[in-house]
């Protein structure tokens, strides 16, 4: 039995209002003072898992989230409005350095699991071997992670994308891979009853995507956890080698206006605010040591548009329902892509009439993308002056740009093998439209720099990395801060390096591991 053939539990609460019991901004009347055994900051893939597992273990758990809950009625299909409401910095967040690289993180109950494509990939065993060597521990070998992956997959109903919701866009990718002898497979996703509506980015109105706000958070509440949204954590309160709690503010959704103070006292503190926010909390608290906020890594990505003779209707089918891991050990992952037209339009060339002409072929387009494990590139997270948002820096090494270019060349081959009539490469210094495979060789032969590309990176990790020794990282192999006895981190900041694939499932498996460690210890962590 493979990892993706585990029996899937049916949803035991299919008609339950998932956000029942969640405290929202309108519920607060003044200063908020809370006492609990365990306080978890962040309700995304890392924090929600810890909250659910510890609540079910009998702990008194409080879960804090800065963003509001989004019900089906709150989703907006218009992407500009959706980004403004659901994403940090209204979707304009970017890393600076050798080039600007946009990166998107959600501010919502459920975190980025609400707006991602539900991709749930296990990192291969060789990733954990490399991590263990870098971290100096055997605690995160592949065999040690197996039961944690299995628990998460079973709870979320992770399975390969079903054939009846693939749509032609995903099947064209498969056709091209098959013709070239490149292995590919339906993408494993955390969905139940997906209808292939392609609306992952703006929120699943069918409630098929098992984002943590409709899966782990309700389960945590059923087990007794208390959930407070619109609460921003500003710092950790410590005494000696222990964290005593947190301080923060109630913040108004969408405006970020500060409200009354929040104070939490707890025996155990778990920071899972995301690898771009957790370091800021630590730095504002004078915690984390020399490595906090350093070693930021991304998965830079590029997309290519294939244009076909017959309608593709790319809006039909699972958002990212097929992928190829064929070149994964080289650091390349190939995927099918979809996003709302106003988002993908940024990748279309031309202005004015030329741009409009491209839109006339929109129904015949199929976008495919490549992401790379940029092992030669690195960055950092630092506080931004006068803001609670991070200052991000990332230097995209030319060796990783070359790898991305290699992946783009393979995507071009896939397009032609699938029957494309032309492609739109979306690169500076390359023809806007390419009409033959021979002409497309320029994608391999032209020397591209990072600034010649329209690169984005929504996978971020590494800023509070795990290491056995405090001299090498921020937390130990259990996720506990080296300098405190009872403060843990449970987000992608833990990663010692790239997971090679989409990071959500590995983040959740590590969170399950962190939770099991805390549950096995005494009440004071």
Image (cartoon, rainbow, N blue to C red):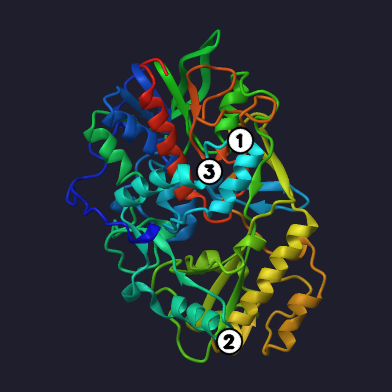
For the residue labelled by badge 3, is the local secondary structure a helix, a strand or a loop? loop
Q: Dot 1: few (<14), some (14–19), or many (≥20) neighbours within 10 Å?
A: many
Residue shown at 46%/56% (left/top)? Answer: 121
Regarding residue 91, the answer to whether it shows in the image is yes
Height in image: 67 above or below 16? Answer: above
For the residue labelled by badge 2, is the local secondary structure a helix, a strand or a loop? helix
Residue projecting furthest to the top: 240
Label 1, label 3: how far apart the Cα atoms are = 16 Å
Provide residue 354's location: percent of width, then percent of height.
65, 81
Q: Which mark is residue 90?
A: none
On screen, residue 395 versus residue 224, left or right, reads right
Provide residue 188's location: percent of width, then percent of height.
41, 62
Q: Residue under label 2, please give it.
A: 417
On screen, residue 233 versus residue 194, left or right, reads right
Height in image: 486 above or below 254? Answer: above
Location of the N terminus (image quadrant): bottom left
For the residue labelled by badge 1, is the local secondary structure a helix, a strand or a loop? loop
Nearer the observer, 505 or 355? 505
Q: Dot 2: few (<14), some (14–19), or many (≥20) neighbours within 10 Å?
A: some
Provide residue 136's location: percent of width, then percent of height.
63, 34
Label 1, label 2: how far apart the Cα atoms are = 41 Å
Regarding residue 33, the answer to whether it shows in the image is no
Q: Residue under label 3, please give it.
A: 141
Residue shown at 44%/59% (left/top)? Answer: 117
Q: Residue under label 1, please give it.
A: 465
- Label 2 or label 3, whichever comes before in sequence order: 3
On screen, residue 106 versus residue 223, left or right, reads right
Residue shown at 27%/40% (left/top)? Answer: 218
Q: Of circles 1 and 3, which is in front?
A: 3
């Amino acid at each position: 039995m493979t990892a993706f053939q585990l029996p899937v539990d049916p949803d035991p609460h299919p008609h339950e209002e998932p956000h029942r019991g969640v405290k929202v901004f309108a519920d607060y009347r003044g200063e908020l003072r809370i006492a609990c055994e365990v306080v978890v900051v962040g309700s995304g893939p890392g924090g929600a898992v810890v909250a659910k597992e510890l609540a079910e273990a009998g702990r008194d758990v409080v879960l804090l989230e800065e963003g509001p809950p989004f019900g089906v009625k709150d989703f907006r299909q218009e992407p500009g409005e959706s980004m403004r409401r659901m994403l940090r910095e209204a979707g304009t967040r970017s890393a600076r350095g050798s080039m600007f690289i946009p990166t998107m993180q959600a501010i919502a109950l459920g975190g980025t699991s609400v707006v991602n494509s539900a991709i749930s990939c296990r990192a291969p065993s060789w990733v954990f071997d490399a991590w263990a060597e870098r971290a100096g521990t055997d605690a995160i070998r592949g065999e040690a992670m197996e039961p944690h992956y299995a628990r998460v997959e079973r709870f979320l109903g992770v399975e390969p994308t079903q054939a009846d919701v693939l749509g032609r866009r995903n099947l064209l990718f498969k056709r091209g891979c098959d013709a070239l002898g490149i292995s590919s497979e339906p993408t494993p996703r955390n969905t139940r009853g997906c209808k292939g509506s392609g609306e992952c980015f703006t929120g699943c109105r069918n409630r098929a995507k098992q984002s943590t706000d409709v899966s782990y958070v309700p389960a945590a509440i059923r087990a007794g956890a208390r959930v407070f949204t619109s609460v921003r954590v500003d710092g950790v309160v410590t005494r000696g080698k222990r964290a005593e709690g947190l301080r923060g503010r109630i913040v108004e959704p969408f405006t970020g206006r500060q409200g009354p103070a929040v104070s939490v006292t707890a025996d155990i503190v778990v920071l899972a605010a995301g690898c771009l926010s957790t370091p800021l909390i630590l730095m504002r608290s004078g915690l984390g040591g020399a490595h906090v906020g350093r070693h930021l890594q991304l998965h830079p990505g590029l997309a290519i548009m294939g244009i076909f003779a017959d309608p593709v209707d790319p809006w039909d089918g699972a958002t990212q329902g097929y992928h190829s891991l064929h070149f994964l050990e080289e650091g390349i992952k190939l995927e099918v892509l979809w996003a709302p037209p106003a988002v993908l339009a940024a990748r279309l060339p031309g202005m004015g009439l030329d741009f409009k002409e491209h839109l006339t072929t929109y129904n015949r387009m199929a976008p495919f993308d490549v992401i790379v494990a940029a092992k030669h590139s690195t960055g950092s997270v630092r506080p931004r002056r006068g803001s609670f948002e991070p200052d991000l820096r990332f230097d995209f090494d030319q060796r990783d740009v070359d790898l991305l270019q290699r992946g783009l060349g393979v995507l071009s081959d896939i397009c032609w093998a699938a029957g494309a009539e032309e492609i739109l490469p979306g690169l500076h210094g390359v023809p806007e439209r390419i009409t033959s495979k021979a002409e497309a060789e320029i994608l391999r032969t032209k020397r591209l720099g990072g600034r010649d590309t329209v690169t984005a990176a929504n996978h971020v990790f590494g800023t509070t990395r795990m290491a056995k020794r405090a001299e090498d990282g921020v937390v130990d192999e259990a996720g506990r801060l080296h300098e405190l006895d009872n403060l843990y981190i449970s987000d992608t900041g833990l990663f010692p390096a790239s997971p090679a694939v989409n990071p959500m499932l590995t983040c959740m498996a590590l969170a399950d591991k962190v939770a099991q460690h805390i549950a096995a210890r005494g009440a004071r962590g």
